[in-house]
Structure formats: structure tokens, C-alpha cells
Image: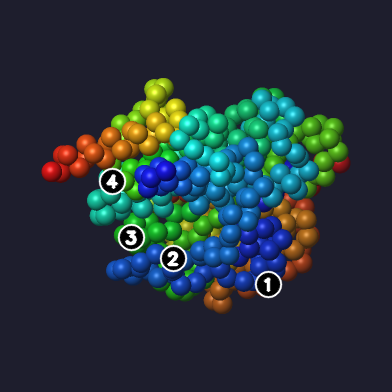
Amino acid sequence: MDEVATKIIDILKKHMKEPRDDIGLNTALTDLKIESLDLAMIVFDIEDSFGIEIPYNANEEAADFKTVGSVVDRVRALMSGAAAAKA
Amino acid sequence: MVVTGMGVVTPIGTTVADFWASCRAGRSGVGPLGGFPLEDLKILIAAQIKDFDHKARLKHFRRDKIIIHADRYSWFAAAAADEAIKQAGLEAPFQNPYRTACIIGSGAGGLVTFESAYRDLFILNKRATHPLTLLRIIGSSAAAHVGIEYGVKGPTFATCSACSTAAHAIGLGRDYIRAGLIDLAIVGASESVINYGTMKAWQAMHVLSPQGCFPFAKKRNGTVLGEGAGVLVLESEEHAKARGAKVLAELCGFGMTSDSKDMVNPDIDGPSEAMRLALADARVATTDIDYINAHGTATTINDRNETNAIKKVFGAHAGQLAISSTKSMHGHPLGAGGAIEAIASLKAMEENWVPPTIGLDEPDPECDLDYVPNMGREKRVTYAMSNSFAFGGLNAVLVFGPPPA
């Protein structure tokens, strides 16, 4: 796993009542018992850590946030977008 | 309507036992202001709570998953409610959740969160506030947190009436029980607003003392900001009896009025009418009252006005009353005051010992009643009154009596 994935998993663990060590890219967020308020805090932390803004509305089903891997992919895409904007 | 539980968080004790031990010892919670950069502040004292470990006090909370991330004012409310509910011998979730109320007010809600969020945005140019900012700020969050933890599904909201907030919450809970809407109510208020912006705002009102909180004293020169929470468990007599609860006292009278006159200058009619209504509601005579826990803020105008209002209501009996302002010890906890002071009144009844007004070396000649100066004393207290008179002229008075025979 690369640095982005490791960082994201650390953030997820920080927001879990009982952090697990078996979280991988295929782990579904629903398996981590992450509720909507937790998700808002996780998004906030990810944005802060990576200097990005994740378009996310708690009223909508977010396909991007189904698994840990989908979150990592989304963050990576936003990071390259941010880098391209700066270039 | 009976009281079966009480809980407090104050600068002179973060449980009822510790709070009362401090009252017994005549201890002051006023000290040097701290906890944030004081910058250009001129008033440098407050009654702050320094020994409150929210993680330790609230670690057993289960249903409310985010209490640890809440504003400090919600922590105080949660800890006070927890103590009150435990004393009442109740277990969560409550048996009849829709017949239970949770009315916990706050004068200002999560003002400390508000200031830090705005600092982040306007000074530190942060891109966003913390996601829990809104939930921390709202003035109903303490009531909601407590309601979630204990499974309260009936009327749940906050009252807001500055320094009368708690007394209004307690009175409303009682009225709901009396009206038959509910059987049980968790009532009180919480406040925690001591920060740079609050100190500046109060400083600009020119009502804070730079030296200390000395109610009814000649030397008094303003109030001292405090913080804390007080919560009572109220229930109908039948409800308490049916579950074999120990009854601490009866909440037998409640009176509320508004001066409808001035935001800061109280008049005699509003407060005296609130006291008169509370006595009439309790169906007791003026001569039945043994102790008054005064609003006693140590501002020039409040203490004189309250003295005159007491004289107007009690007549010749005014001189027989033991009157004290426990704010001399715990400072002015704003919205939470009425609940903390109701608990001081209940303890006075339980132990037949009236708490002192400390710092009262020389009384103001215009404040000439018995304010129990400096030393508390033994006195039979069968009925006690607790006064709350708020900015805006909003008055709320509670009368407590012995457990029904």
C-alpha cells in the first residue's frame, strides 16, 4: 500500500471507536461502522492532510465512498487535479 | 412535584458533595483568569472550573457517541445530569421515554466553540470549520446530548433567558408534570462562555468587578463571571412513590414575570411579583420561608433592588429571613445559576444549615437584611426560595418545601 492509502487508513482508524488492523483497500466503509457524522469528520481530516477539497454532500449516496480503495482513488484523482491546477 | 436527584458542576466542586463541602467551608472559586491569551483584557479574574476531566466523567456514556467531542457546556450538563440521574436511582433508557422530558437550558450555548471557529476562519484563514462546530454551538445541544444518552423521547429542548434560564427550565418541567404531559423531567441549565470575546463583551457593559464577587457588601463593584451546570430530576409524587424513590424535597412553587421595562435596570415590581406568585403557587405564607438563596450578583443595582423587592413581599418577616448569595463563592454562572442555587437551597433544607455570603465584611447601608455574612450557620430550613432575576428584566422564582407526608 502506498503512502496515500496508509494515511487514509490511519485517519479512518482515528475515527473508529474500536480501530481494527485488518483494513485493506477492499474493506467496505459500512463494515467499519462509520456513520454520517463520522464521515464528515473523516472527510475534514482527509482534506486537511492532503490539502484538497472533496465535493461531498451528506444527503447523497456517495459511490466514491463505498470502499477504502474508492476513497483512496478519489483522493488521488483530486490530488492530481490540484497539482495540475497549480502547474 | 418532587425532587429525587441533583447534580452540579461548579468552580468550587464538580459534584454535589464537593460543592456543598466548599459552601460549608466558605471557599471562593474566584481566581486569576486563564486558559486563553488574555491580550488586552482589563478584567483578569473569573470563577473557572479547573479540575473537570470530561473524559473521565463521561467515559461510560454509551448511547451518545459524540459527547466527548461536544462543547464544554454540554460536558458540564452531561456530568450534572449523570450525577442527578444516579442519585434518583434511575437507569437508562428510561421506562416511559415519551413521558419523560429533558429541558436543559443555556444562556449562550457553545460560545467558546463559536469564537474558536471564527478565529479559524477570520484570523487563521482556515478553509473550513471543524465538522462538529454547528452541533457544538447550538444552545439545545446539551439537552439533546443528555436526552440521547438517557433515552428521553418526550419534550426535549433548551430554555434561554440569561440568568433565569435554569429556573425557567426547572419551572417548565414541573408544569409539564403538573399538566399530566409527563411523569419525569431532567431539568436545569449549563453555561461555559469564559473566553476572550465574552470577557470583552462583559467588560464593555462595565458590570464586572476587577477584585471579586462581594454581594450586598459596601465594597461590591460588580459581578464575577463563572461557569458550570446544575440539573435536577423532578417527578410526580405518584411516580416517585411507585418506584420507591427517595424524595429529597417538594418543588412546590414557581413564579415568573417580566419587568417589561429595561434591559439592564431592574424594577421592584417584576421581582416581587415573581416571588409573590411563587409563594401563592406553593400555598405557603411569607412567614413559612426560612431561607432565600438570593440572585445576589454583587452589582450595585441588583443587590439593592433585590433587597427592596424582598422587603416589599415579606414585610416584617424580611428581617427574620436568612438570605445569602452563594455567587460570592461560585461566581455568576449566568444561565446555570438558578439550578446551582436551587441545589444550594435543597442542601440547606436537607442539613438545616444556611450557606454564607462570603466577603461581606461591611454591608451596604441600603442592604440591611440578614445575608448570613461570611459564616454559614445552623438554622431550621423547612421552606426555601431561590431567586433568579435576569438581564432584560426576566424573573423566575422557585420555592422548595419538605417531602410530602
Question: In this figure, which residue is indicated by the disc labeled 2?
Answer: B35
In this view, the residue in front, B356 or B246, is B246
Q: Earlier in the sequence, mark 2 or mark 3?
A: 2
Q: Residue B254 location, x and y as percent?
A: 63, 40
Question: In this figure, which residue is indicated by the disc labeled 3?
Answer: B200
Q: Quadrant of residue B380?
A: bottom right
Q: Is residue B113 left or right of residue B295?
A: left
In this view, the residue in front, B183 or B161, is B183
Give the distance between the C-alpha atoms of the residues marked 2 and 3, in whole angstroms.
15 Å
Question: In this figure, which residue is indicated by the disc labeled 1?
Answer: B25
Give the distance between the C-alpha atoms of the residues marked 2 and 1, in whole angstroms.
26 Å
Secondary element under disc 1, as helix, strand or loop, is helix
Sort mark 4 into few (<14), some (14-19) or many (20+) by Cα contacts within 10 Å: few
Sort mark 3 into few (<14), some (14-19) or many (20+) by Cα contacts within 10 Å: some
Q: Is residue B385 visible?
A: no
Q: Residue B257 location, x and y as percent?
A: 52, 39
Q: Is residue B321 left or right of residue B338?
A: right
Secondary element under disc 4, as helix, strand or loop, is loop
Chain letter, disc 1 residue: B
Amino acid at the residue labelled 4? Gly
Q: Nearer the viewer, mark 2 or mark 1?
A: 2
Secondary element under disc 2, as helix, strand or loop, is loop
Sort mark 1 into few (<14), some (14-19) or many (20+) by Cα contacts within 10 Å: some
Q: Earlier in the sequence, mark 2 or mark 1?
A: 1
